[in-house]
Amino acid sequence: MEGLKRSKIKDLLNGKAGEEVLVKGWVRTKRGNKQLKFIALNDGSTINNIQIVVNAEQFDKDLITAIGTGASIAVKGKLVSSTGSEQLVEVQAEDIELYGACDPMRYPIQKKDTSLEYLRTVAHMRLRTNTFGAILRIRHSMAFAIHKFFNDKGFVYLHTPIITESDAEGAGDMFQVTTMDLSNVPTHKNKIDYSKDFFGKKTSLTVSGQLEGELGATAVGEIYTFGPTFRAENSNTPRHLAEFWMIEPEMAFYDINDNMQLSEEFVKYLVKYALDNCKDDLQFLNDKYDNSLIERLEQVLNTEFVRLSYTEGIEILEKAIAEGHKFEYPVHWGTDLQSEHERYLVETHFGKPVILIDFPKDIKAFYMKLNDDGKTVRGMDILVPKIGEIVGGSEREASLEKLEARITELNMNRKNLEWYIDTRRFGSVPHSGFGLGFERLLLFVTGMSNIRDVIPFPRTPKNAEF
C-alpha cells in the first residue's frame, strides 16, 4: 500500500469516482454472502460510513473471517459510483490489511442499540460509537468557536491557576490539594499545620478563574479564560459534574447592559457555528435522541432574548401557581430559582430565551454590584429551553468601600482577598463578566439529557475511572 496517501472518509464521500484511494478505519458492520462482502468503515472523521465492497474470492478466507465489528483495517481500492441509495460512492477493495482483529464475543460495543447508561460503564470504548463520535466532534467545534469568537474581538486568552487558595464565590465544596502524608498529618495546637504542606498554606482545585480574570481585565482590558474547574459537590444529578470546563470572560469598562449584549451574541455565535459546521452530527442526534433539537437551535438563533427582572420573574411564577401550576420547589421573592422555574419562564411563558437580571443580593456572590435599592445586585442569568441557566454573570462592584462593606457583612476572610481588593484600591473601573459552563452548552447544542454524556470521561461522586 506504499505510495498512496490516506484519505479521510469525510473527504472521500464527496470524491469523484475513478480515483485510487487508501482508507483506514474501524469496521462498523460487515454483511453479504459468500461472493460479496459489504463493510461499513468509519475513521472518526464523520458520522457517515463509507461502504467497502469486497469480492471475497479475491482474498484469503481467514482474513475475511477476521474482519468483524470493531476490527481496524486499511483498504486500497478504487472509488466507484454506488448503486445503493444511502451513498453516492463506495470503495471497490483491491488490497486489505488487517491492523487489529476484534473478538465479537468480547467487544463491549455491539451492533444493536446500546443504552447510554450501559455505555457510561465502558466509557473508554463508548467513544467509538456513532453517538459519542458526533459529540466529540461537536465538542471540538464548540471549543474552536469559543477561541475564534474572543480572538476575533481582540480578547486576550488568560490562563488562570488550577491550584488556588481562593474559593471565589465562597461556595466551599472544593477538592483539597496536598502532598502531606494523610496517615501522619502534621499539627500545631491541635490544628492541621499547613505550613508544612507543599505550598505552605491550604490549597484546593479551583472552582472558578473569575477573580484572577478580573486582574487580567484591569490590565489588558478584555480577557477570557477557558479551562477545567472543580466542585466537590456530592451530587449525582444529570446536571452536575465534579470536573468540568468553564469559559469566563472579564471586560473592563463594561456595564451590565454591555455584558448582556456580549453574552447573547456569544451564545448565538456558538449556536450558528454548530449549525453551520456540524450539520451531519446534529442531524444524527436530532433523529436519534431529540427530534426538536435543530428546530430549537434555529429558534434561539433567530430570536431576541427577553430581558426580565428577577422580581418580574417571581411575579410570573407566583401567578402560575395561583392558576394551578405545580412546582416541586417553593418559589417566592428571595429564593434561588430552580431549573423547573427557569424552564417554565423560557418554555411555557415566553417561548424564547430569557436574560434574568437584578437578583436579591443575599442569593448572589459578594462581588456583584449593588443596585440603588440596596436589596438587589446587577447579576444576570441567561436561560434557554430544555436546560435553564446556561450563563451566569454580573457587573462587578467597582467601589472599594461597597466591596469592603459586603465582605465584612458576609464575615469573609479578608486575608485571602487583599490582592483582589487591590483592583479597587488602584485605578478601579466599571467592569463585568460572565461564566458559561462548557458542558451545559454542549447539553443544549447536542440535545443530550445527561451531562455525563457530553464529556469524554465524567468525574462524579464515586466515579473517577480511566
Image: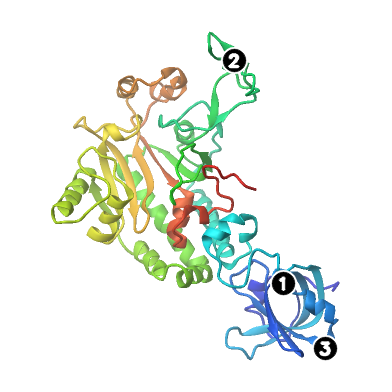
SS at badge 1 = loop
In this rendering, position of residue 423 left or right of residue 15 = left
Could you tell which of marks 2 and 3 lies nearer the N-terminus?
Answer: 3
At label 1, the amino acid type is Ser
Query: Which color mode does the image show?
Result: rainbow
Q: Which mark is residue 195?
A: 2
Labelled pair 3, 1 in contact (Cβ < 8 Å): no
Name the residue type under label 3.
Answer: Glu
Instruction: State the residue at coordinates (44%, 19%).
Output: 418
Q: Considering only vertical position in the picture, is 389 above or below 183?
A: below
Marks 1 and 2, how far apart in space?
Answer: 57 Å
Label placed on residue 7: 1
- Element at label 2: helix
Residue in front for this viewpoint, 463 or 71: 463
**Residue holding disc 3:** 57
- Circle 3: element type: helix
* Amino acid found under the numbered disc labelled 2: Ser
User: Going by the image, does 385 lie left or right of 92?
Assistant: left
